[in-house]
Structures are given as structure tokens and as C-alpha cells.
Image (tube, coloured by chain):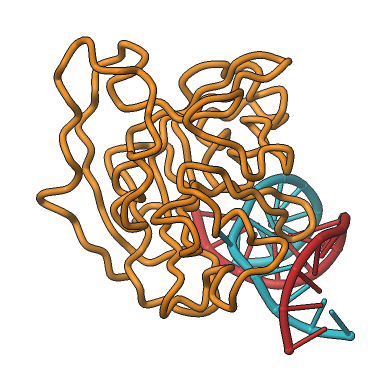
Chain colours: A orange, B red, C cyan
DNA sequence: GGTGGGATTAGCT
DNA sequence: GCTAATCCCACCA
């Protein structure tokens, strides 16, 4: 399995102690591969009626509109993939294998049809709620995998097309939450679970994290 | 430890 | 009708 470790990975987070703790829509309006890297280390927050759950993003995959048949938008716009063609910074949620939801972040520009699949989170807050939703006590399996993390976070089709800069489901920058910003050991490798375009190195993960769905 | 099959549904051909 | 950006558990070594 080929993989590539980046020596100059992701832009360093701003050291400014009064930096905004929200992310604005410009953060998402970048190339899909770039966004897949930049999302590593940021926080996915869901303020649900049952409680707040927060996970640190440690694994992503980029899906491109051109030369990428594994991408849902590869054959044009449909009712299902319409959010991918919407403004960046919104969510794209779909049902897979009849039982699991996958959560994506729309990237690039409106009308392009690209997104970043979130594949794994490090559980940060609301871990008991995650355990109840997942019906497991195993911390390492709570959010390791796209279907698992949506279940743990309580993400459903209701969040399809949601604005991720605010609202119940949103993303916070690396320096948010007042936690120490951990160094990210970014590794690019092949995407998982697809039957075409398998040679592209479009999966990005923080190899230092023990919460990945699979080692790169 | 590793593997194979079943669950279950929307979208596409 | 078939496939899909998946997961879990039973089963076997």
C-alpha cells in the first residue's frame, strides 16, 4: 500500500490567543485536497438535544469532480448529490449500504461538485453519549470509520446541506476549545472501500493518532 | 488473530 | 436488479 508522508504538511494554526474560535466560510473555499489536509486537527461539534459531542478530525478523504469515478458527482448532478454542488462549508450526508450514514464537507467552489469525506474522529467530549449511541464501550471503535462516527455524533440526513460554520453541527478550528494544538503527522495514502480510482493518494490522516479507521 | 457473510435501502442502469 | 465512499459478529485457525 503506497503512502506518502508530507514534510511540509498543513498551514500552522495561528498562535494569536484571541484568534476567532469559529471558522468562516473562506476556510472551506479551497481545493478539495487542501481542505482534506486542513480539516485534520479541527473539531466537529454536534450540539444535539441529547447533549454535546465533539470529535477531533484525524482522517479524511478527498473526492474530486474530474478524473475520479469514485466520486458521487463524477456523473453529474443528481438529487442525492446536489449538496456537493452547493456552497463550500456545507455538509453532504448520504446513506450507504442501506444502514450507515457518511458525512462529507463540501469544498472548492459552488457548482464544482467536490467534497471531503470525514473517516475518523478522536472522541473529545460527550464520550458517554457516544458510547450510548454506538452501544459499545470500546473507545478506539467509537468514531473510527465513516459509519461509526456519524452514529456516535448523531449525524443523520437531517444534517444534509447544513451550514458547518454555525448551527447545531459545525466545525471549530484547531486552536479552539483551549486545548494544546497537537502536532499533526500527516500521511497521504490510498482511499478505502472504493472499487475504482484506487491508485490516487487522496486519503489523509494524522498518523500519530490511535483513533484511525486503519493504519496508512 | 483473521475472514466471510449478512444486514438493508436509495440511486442508478 | 444490482451496486454501494460499511460494520459487526460468528466462526475458524
Q: Is residue A34 left or right of residue A162?
A: left
Residue found at x 26% / y 53%: A187
Front-most of A109 and A39? A109
How many marks the image carries: the answer is 0
Front-most of B12 and A138? B12
Quadrant of the rendered image containing residue A81: bottom right
A63 in relation to A52, above or below: below
A107 in relation to A19, above or below: below
Front-most of A95 and A162? A162
Looking at the picture, how far across and down is residue A45, in whole percent?
52, 25
For the C terminus of chain A, give its image quadrant. bottom left
Looking at the picture, how far across and down is residue B6, in whole percent?
86, 63
Residue found at x 38% / y 44%: A28
Residue found at x 44% / y 78%: A197
A52 in relation to A107, above or below: above
Quadrant of the rendered image containing residue A58: top left
Q: Is residue A137 left or right of residue A124?
A: right
Q: Is residue A40 left or right of residue A44?
A: left
For the N terminus of chain A, give its image quadrant. bottom left
Q: Is residue A117 left or right of residue A147?
A: left
Residue found at x 38% / y 31%: A24
Front-most of A150 and A170? A170
Looking at the picture, how far across and down is residue A188, in whole percent?
28, 58
Looking at the picture, how far across and down is residue A207, in whole percent?
29, 45
Amino acid at each position: 500500500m503506497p503512502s506518502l508522508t508530507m514534510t511540509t504538511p498543513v498551514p500552522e494554526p495561528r498562535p494569536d490567543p484571541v484568534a476567532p474560535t469559529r471558522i468562516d466560510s473562506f476556510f472551506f473555499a479551497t481545493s478539495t485536497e487542501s481542505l482534506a489536509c486542513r480539516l485534520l486537527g479541527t473539531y466537529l461539534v454536534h450540539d444535539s438535544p441529547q447533549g454535546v459531542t465533539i470529535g477531533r478530525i484525524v482522517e479524511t478523504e478527498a473526492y474530486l469532480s474530474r478524473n475520479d469515478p469514485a466520486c458521487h458527482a463524477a456523473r453529474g448532478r443528481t438529487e442525492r448529490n446536489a449538496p456537493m454542488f452547493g456552497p463550500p462549508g456545507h455538509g453532504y450526508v448520504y446513506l450507504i449500504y442501506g444502514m450507515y450514514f457518511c458525512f462529507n464537507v463540501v469544498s472548492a467552489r459552488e457548482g464544482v461538485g467536490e467534497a471531503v469525506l470525514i473517516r475518523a474522529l478522536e472522541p473529545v467530549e460527550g464520550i458517554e453519549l457516544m458510547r450510548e449511541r454506538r452501544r459499545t464501550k470500546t473507545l478506539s471503535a467509537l468514531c473510527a470509520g465513516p459509519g461509526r462516527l456519524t452514529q456516535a455524533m448523531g449525524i443523520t440526513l437531517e444534517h444534509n446541506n447544513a451550514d458547518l460554520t454555525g448551527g447545531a453541527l459545525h466545525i471549530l478550528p484547531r486552536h479552539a476549545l483551549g486545548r494544546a494544538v497537537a502536532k499533526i503527522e500527516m500521511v497521504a495514502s490510498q482511499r478505502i472501500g472504493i472499487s475504482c480510482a484506487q491508485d490516487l493518494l487522496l486519503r489523509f490522516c494524522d498518523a500519530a493518532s490511535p483513533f484511525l479507521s486503519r493504519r496508512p
